[in-house]
Amino acid sequence: MKKNLFVILIACISTISFAQDDPFASWNANYREVDIDDLLSREEHYADSIENDRDIVQFYVRQDGYRFMGRFTGNRRKIDPETIKAMKMVFKYYGGDLAIFDEIRREVEIVAGDRKIWMPIQPVLEKPFEYDVAKNSDVYIYALFMNLHSNDGKLNNIFLISEFIPQ
């Protein structure tokens, strides 16, 4: 009887463990993995090409979901109001709720590729990030990328942290 119970217990545990999906499968489907250096180099090249041709409209926006590995420097700061303004301008073109950006208060500094980037973080993630991600440790980031090239030639590449996995 004990042997049969043990076999049933093992079968149940195996079934449960195989039945569970990867908890980040849906995130991975919606956030494409990218090389940050390559992505930002392409964005900078495109902005330069636009600025060199005055017949092309100088204003453009783009939004996409990306994921990538980074290293948290340990630095945090209050978000610049200009960053909030840029996020709102991009999001407006995609029909989103602009009020959600008013809640964002902080940015964290991430080294991704060869670049140090200040990334806004959603308020709900601030405390878990502080608790789970140590200074100089790796973190896998899921971010909403917002790109704004304004008429005055300023290029904003913003990565709003939507989720993260400490490494």
Image (spheres, rainbow, N blue to C red):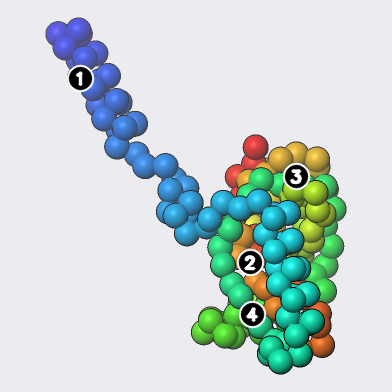
Sequence-wise, the earlier of marks 1 and 2 is: 1
Pointers 3 and 1 in contact (CB under 8 A)? no
Instruction: Find disc 3 in the rendering and name its residue.
Output: 71
Q: Amino acid at mark 4?
A: Val
Residue where numbered disc 4 is placed: 61
The residue that label 1 is drawn on is 8
| Residue 134, x across and y down, in percent | 76, 41
Camera-near label (1 vs 2) is 2
Can you tell which of label 3 and label 4 is closer to the viewer? 4
Residue 25 lies, in percent from the top left, at: 43, 48
Residue 165's x, y, as percent? Answer: 60, 45
**How far apart are labels 3 and 1 at the CA level?**
45 Å
> Disc 3 marks which amino acid?
Arg
- The crowd level at tag 1 (other Cα within 10 Å; few <14, some 14-19, many 20+) is few
Task: Give me the C-alpha separation between circle 4 and circle 2.
Answer: 11 Å
- The type of residue carrying mark 1 is Ile
